[in-house]
Amino acid sequence: MRPSPAVPPAPQASSRGAARGRTRLANNAWEAAFTAHSTLMKQFAADDVWAGLSMREYDVLYTLSKSGVPQRLGDLSGHVLLSQPGLSRLVDRLVERGLVARCVDPTDARAANLTLTDEGRALQRRIGRAHGASVAAAMTARLTDEELALLEALSLKLVSDPDSLPEEHP
Amino acid sequence: MRPSPAVPPAPQASSRGAARGRTRLANNAWEAAFTAHSTLMKQFAADDVWAGLSMREYDVLYTLSKSGVPQRLGDLSGHVLLSQPGLSRLVDRLVERGLVARCVDPTDARAANLTLTDEGRALQRRIGRAHGASVAAAMTARLTDEELALLEALSLKLVSDPDSLPEEHP
DNA sequence: GCCAATTATATGCGTACGCATGTAACTAAC
DNA sequence: GTTAGTTACATGCGTACGCATATAATTGGC
């Protein structure tokens, strides 16, 4: 689906060499993963568990909850699919709602040093429990334990950066 | 990550029964898949191949290109992660740019019956080729052919609807 | 110690999005 | 045939987003 395979139906991956087939394989995998993500996201978004936050806002609360504590905007931006200004204003909103606090970093006056308030942590946990149950229901309904473990392993490997990637051809 | 596991670090999946462990397995798999998706999307978005369209707009062009031809808004909305009004206006933009045409359905005057213009099809192909190459580069850099096929199979199975899902416990 | 370059975050501005609701067309019961 | 109900899409309105740019703080050469 979407921002994805693009390579049109294509004749048959055969012209010459296996490169074509490998490209199609990769694009098919991406499209399937993309579609699965899209479908599940819609399903989760429809859940009535978000307590007035957007999924992105919850995502930030979750990331803060998971990662020890004081995170800077730059740290979060690596985890959230959002531009830096977008993230900045999203955090504004969370601060206004009393869920996140901006503390000053003694060693760098530019930094934001974001931390969850007690209320923010409590809300994250409340939403997290309900959402986690929904995720588990959706995932376990179709995949076995082995398949779940495999999906996790493949996903981790897909974006691992051992030292960089082996450029074009190793 | 994100709209995902939520179940906090959790002690150890052991309290009693395997249900806890299965839940954690499912949430870990979702988080890994979510993170991989997010990371790759950022990477693809940074590619200079979109010719002024957003990835969502390309997604609609791609879906139209892939699915025979006359698609209604309702058909597309199943494929795109966007609200119905959002999709309606996105299509407006594509029509204004001359990439998509709204035809009337003789059997249902409400329907939109969207089709790609020649220009729209050409642009989709142009973008698709470049994006497909980028996708292939990213995916094949980390995964073997077998792993790519496995990821595709797992993704397809994850959102298959054989007849509905086996409710709570089968 | 001073200034260019870089880093970390914020803001202006235009656009896109979601929610609620509107409008038009189809369906069906009577 | 009329009308309640439903389906398919569009529009008003407020908010969130991305891009470009601004501001403030830190670092590195000299």
Image (spheres, coloured by chain):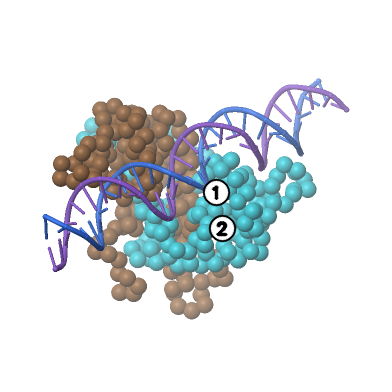
Chain colours: A brown, B cyan, C blue, D purple
Q: Amino acid at mark 1?
A: His
Q: Is residue B127 left or right of residue A92?
A: right
Label 2 Cα neighbours within 10 Å, binned few <14 / some 14-19 / many ≥20: many
Q: Are marks 1 and 2 on the same chain?
A: yes
Q: Which percent across, then down, holds residue D14? A: 50, 32
Residue at 34%, 34% in the rendered image = A94
Q: Quadrant of the N terminus of chain B?
A: top left
Q: Secondary structure at mark 1?
A: loop
Residue at the spot of label 2: B62
Q: Position of residue A107 (x, y in %)?
A: 15, 45
> Image quarter for residue A86?
top left
Q: Quadrant of residue D10?
A: top right
Number of numbered callouts drawn? 2
Q: A9 or A120: nearer the eye? A: A120
Q: Is residue B32 positioned above or below A165 on the image?
A: above
Query: Residue shown at 30%/69% (left/top)?
Result: A166
Which residue is label 1 attached to? B79
Q: Is residue B29 above or below residue A5?
A: above
In front here: A111 or D24?
D24
Tag 2 or tag 1, which sits nearer the N-term? 2
Kind of residue sitting beneath label 2: Tyr
Q: Position of residue D15 (x, y in %)?
A: 46, 35
Give left or right: position of A95 versus B74: left
B35 over B6 or under it: above or below: below
Q: Give the CA separation, mark 1 to mark 2.
A: 11 Å
